[in-house]
Image (spheres, rainbow, N blue to C red):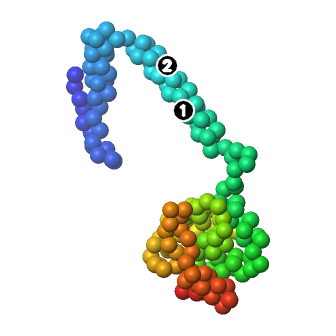
Amino acid sequence: MAFKARKGKQGFEVHGIEEFIEKKLNELRRALGVEAKKVAKEARKIGKAVKARTNAVRKAVKKATAKKPGTTAAPVDQLVKALEAHPKRDALVKAGKQKDQLLRALIPLYVGRNVDGEVSSGATSKFWAKYGVKFAAPNAAKALREHVGYARRTKSGPQITPNGVKYVEHAMASGRKAA
């Protein structure tokens, strides 16, 4: 079998190599006694089994994460409800729209001091998304990690400290950037 090499725009092209590989694979199949149709049929069976298993896993996960009656709402929903009930709601939302990442990370902790469940960085991100503010979860975690003393990490998630409360209240009172 002869191969022909030619220089193309994206390097060298070798013609005849596909036919060579196919020929060798067919020889190997014949030597092993495996027919191509059998292999394709087995592959389809495996594909169907994997798909069925995947669908079963999806259903199980959906069932496990479904909200059951009598359970508490998600932390994001609790945060939104707490903010809507807060007397300084407009000032908090306005302060959250500033480009101060520490302030954006602290406001959900400030509002959610009495919320059941963990106010994670993901919950903080989703909370701000409801108010039209783009704030990625890694940014929330980074802001709390870099500014020591405004929040502490506990077994039930981050909790705002008295210094953090002062920071948020100062930002609301001044109406400008607190950092």
Residue for badge 2: 45
In the picture, the quarter occupied by the C terminus is bottom right
In-image side of 136 versus 112 (left or right): left
Quadrant location, the N terminus: top left
Left-right relation of 9 to 79: left
Q: Position of residue 137 (x, y in %)?
A: 54, 64
Decide which of 24, 45 is in the foreground and name it: 45
Instruction: Locate residue 26: give its quadrant.
Output: top left
Circle number at residue 54: 1
Q: Position of residue 89 (x, y in %)?
A: 74, 76
Residue located 27% across and 42% down the image: 12
Foreground of the two, 134 or 101? 101
Q: Is any atom of residue 133 visible in this view?
A: no
Viewer-proximal residue, 64 or 41?
64
Q: Is residue 13 above or below residue 41?
A: below
Residue 27 in percent (x, y) is at 27, 14
Q: Quadrant of residue 174?
A: bottom right
Q: Amino acid at mark 2?
A: Lys
Mark 2 to mark 1: distance in Å? Answer: 14 Å
Mark 1: secondary structure: helix
Which sits in the foreground, 52 or 162? 162
Q: Secondary structure at mark 2?
A: helix
> Is residue 64 found left or right of 82 in the rendered image?
left
Q: Is residue 84 visible?
A: yes
Indicate which disc, 2 or 1, sits on the residue closer to the N terminus.
Answer: 2
From this view, report whether residue 152 is shown above or below residue 31.
below
